Image: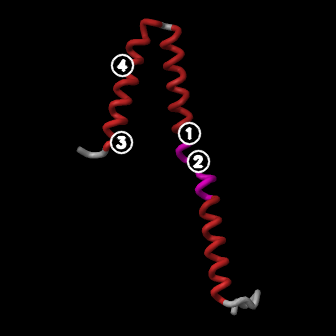
Amino acid sequence: MCEKTQLPILVCEAAMRKLTTFVLKLRVWADTHGQDLIEYALMAGFVAVTAGATMPGVANQISTIFSKVASCMTKSASGPS
């Protein structure tokens, strides 16, 4: 029996497991470690697209850079060769 509630121990353990699981889920939703990196990447992409639209001479260079980044990301996603 649990001391404070007088419930069987199995009921107390199940309630504690549910509470622990709930707290861990809250921690995952509150985790914002990768959010800043994503925001900076989106902002850099927006600046690059804007620069390419306003300065046509730079558009080819920006396109080349995006192609290289996409190629690297594809290689990384496929794993080691």
Q: Earlier in the sequence, mark 3 or mark 1?
A: 1
Query: Residue 76's spot in the image, x, y percent?
Result: 33, 40
Q: Residues within 10 Å of mark 2 (few under 14, many from 20)?
A: few
Up-down relation of residue 76 to residue 31 (above or below): above
- The amino acid type found where label 1 is placed reads Asp
As measured in the structure, the alpha-carbon distance from the residue carrying label 2 to the one carrying label 1 is 8 Å
Q: Residue 28 lies in magenta, yes or no?
A: yes
Q: Tell us which disc is closer to us: 2 or 4.
A: 4
As measured in the structure, the alpha-carbon distance from the residue carrying label 4 to the one carrying label 1 is 25 Å
Q: Is residue 71 left or right of residue 12?
A: left
Q: Earlier in the sequence, mark 4 or mark 1?
A: 1
Query: Residue 6's spot in the image, x, y percent?
Result: 75, 91
Q: Tell us which disc is closer to us: 2 or 3.
A: 3
As measured in the structure, the alpha-carbon distance from the residue carrying label 2 to the one carrying label 3 is 23 Å
Is the stretch drawn in magenta largely helix, strand or loop? helix
Which numbered disc covers residue 36?
1
- Span colored in magenta: 27-36
Q: List the residue tagged with mark 3.
A: 77
Query: Residue 68's spot in the image, x, y percent?
Result: 34, 26
Q: List the residue tagged with mark 2.
A: 32
Q: Residue at x 40, y 18 (%)?
A: 63
2 and 1 marks in contact (CB < 8 Å) = yes
Up-down relation of residue 26 to residue 3 (above or below): above
Q: Secondary structure at mark 2?
A: loop
Q: List the residue tagged with mark 4.
A: 64
Up-down relation of residue 68 to residue 55 (above or below): below
Q: Secondary structure at mark 1?
A: helix
Q: Residue at x 64, y 59 (%)?
A: 26
Which quarter of the picture shows residue 17?
A: bottom right
